[in-house]
Amino acid sequence: MTGFICSPRQYLYHGVTIEVPGIGGPCVVKPNGDIYVRLTKKQTAALLDFYKMPSEEREKYSVGGGCVPL
């Protein structure tokens, strides 16, 4: 039996961990994996800068996630 296991893509950009799920918008996560309810100015600025860059450049900051075959 073959298949895939998928998890949200994660990026580390300027010290901020950004998680991009397949459905919904991006979120900034804490080191323990919980989602921040309120963002600091630094986190907001990093998130906005991250989405202004082309997707090819974003991949340089990838730290995990996505789909992998079993």
Image: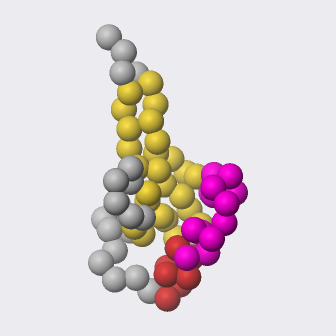
- Image coords of residue 12 (percent x, y): 56, 62
Q: Residue furthest top?
A: 1
Q: Which residues are magenta?
A: 48-61
User: Toward the viewer: 16 or 56?
Assistant: 56
Q: Is 10 inside the magenta-drawn segment?
A: no
User: Toward the viewer: 53 or 17?
Assistant: 53
What secondary structure characterizes most of the magenta part?
Answer: helix
- Image coords of residue 65 (percent x, y): 46, 45
- Residue drawn 46% across the image and 31% down it: 68
Compared across the picture, whether 17 is left or right of 4 comes to: right
Compared across the picture, whether 28 is left or right of 12 comes to: left
- Image coords of residue 32 (percent x, y): 35, 62
- Residue drawn 38% across the image and 54% down it: 21
Q: Would residue 31 be visible to someone looking at this image?
A: no
Q: Is residue 45 above or below residue 50?
A: below
Quarter-of-image position of residue 40: bottom left
- Quarter of the image that includes the C terminus: top left
- Quarter of the image that includes the N terminus: top left
Compared across the picture, whether 21 is left or right of 15 comes to: left
